[in-house]
Amino acid sequence: MTGGAAAAAASQAYGEAWYWDERYRKEAGPFDWYQKYAALAPLLRLYLAPHHRLLLAGCGNSVFGENMVDDGYQDVVNIDISSVVIEQMKKKYHDKPQLKYMKMDVKNMSDFESGSFDAVIDKGTLDSIMCGQNSQENATKMLEEVNRILKENGVYMLNSCVYNCNYARIIAERWEKSPSENKWELTKPLPLDDDNTSLVSLLGPKPDVHYIYVCVKGNGCASTDSKTGEAGN
Ligand SMILES: C[S@@+](CC[C@H](N)C(=O)[O-])C[C@H]1O[C@@H](n2cnc3c(N)ncnc32)[C@H](O)[C@@H]1O
């Protein structure tokens, strides 16, 4: 198999537990996909309060949850389809009661009651499911479950490498690399249009960025104004 074919085959397995079990057995980690906590923290603070009940969906072996707790968040539940990584993380964080780890498939979170989370944070998990087999069906199941477990006005925050206005009712925010200071910067929310023209005219056709989609339950499409408010109770 060529390198390109092997990479394509691997990414098709991103939605499968066996693939991640194997990978986490080999790779000790920790590893954070896409943005790290420091980059996303200002955005999180716009929506989340320290006492909120939060879910990291498809946590992997990232230190995002640990960083959140160190920053004051008190109730961070982590799930992943890989039993291997969940066992590793339970062991690693046995002395941090603010962090809970459970093996669970985001497509079936029936162990969680409806309306029981203030926010779901997803870094790369919907993207993984979109790489796998039956992607549309599986992504729909996941998003239905995310919607079910969120409280009214709860937030689904997706960090993705994909610009896709069909993911949900969304607001995109752009982080821009400043050439002069060589650091990431939070920019104004960017309202979506249907055919991506606003984004393409701003960033060019193939921008080297990650996208952050913020979906507020029950609000339809959250307005730009709502993003400047304090995290509620
Ligand atoms: C691209 S990694 C991202 C890991 C972590 N969120 C991060 O930011 O580093 C995707 C993660 O999603 C998990 N995953 C894939 N499909 C899943 C599913 N159906 N339910 C729960 N977790 C899943 C994988 O095991 C993997 O840990």
Image: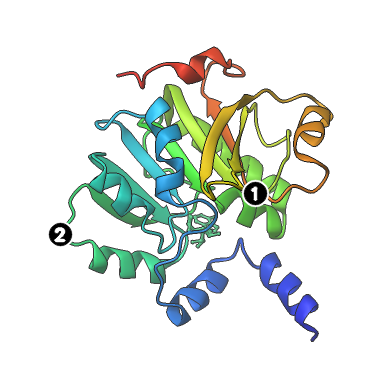
Indicate which label's residue lies in the foreground, 2 or 1: 2
Quadrant location of residue 75? top left
Q: Is residue 103 visible?
A: yes
User: In x, y percent, where is residue 121?
Assistant: 46, 42
Residue closer to the observer: 146 or 171: 171
Q: Where 216 sits versus 74, above or below?
A: above
User: What residue type is disc 2 on?
Assistant: Asp
- Of the numbered discs 2 and 1, the one sitting upstream in the chain is 2
User: In x, y percent, where is residue 83?
Assistant: 40, 67
Q: Where 174 sits versus 85, above or below?
A: above
Q: Is residue 115 visible?
A: no
Task: Assign a secondary structure to mark 1.
Answer: helix
Residue tagged by mark 1? 138
- Residue drawn 34% across and 56% down? 102
Q: How far, Cα to Cα, is label 2 from label 1?
A: 34 Å
- The residue carrying mark 2 has its beta carbon less than 8 Å from ligand 1: no
Residue closer to the observer: 19 or 29: 29
User: What residue type is disc 1 on?
Assistant: Asn
Going by the image, does 163 lie left or right of 176?
right
User: In x, y percent, where is residue 156?
Assistant: 50, 34
- The residue carrying mark 1 has its beta carbon less than 8 Å from ligand 1: yes
Could you tell me how many numbered marks the image carries?
A: 2
Residue tagged by mark 2? 95
Label 2 crowd bin: few (<14), some (14–19), many (20+), radius 10 Å: few
- Residue drawn 44% across and 30% down? 150
Q: Where 151 sits versus 175, above or below?
A: above
Residue closer to the observer: 77 or 45: 45
- Residue drawn 68% across and 52% down? 130
Q: Where 215 sits versus 131, above or below?
A: above
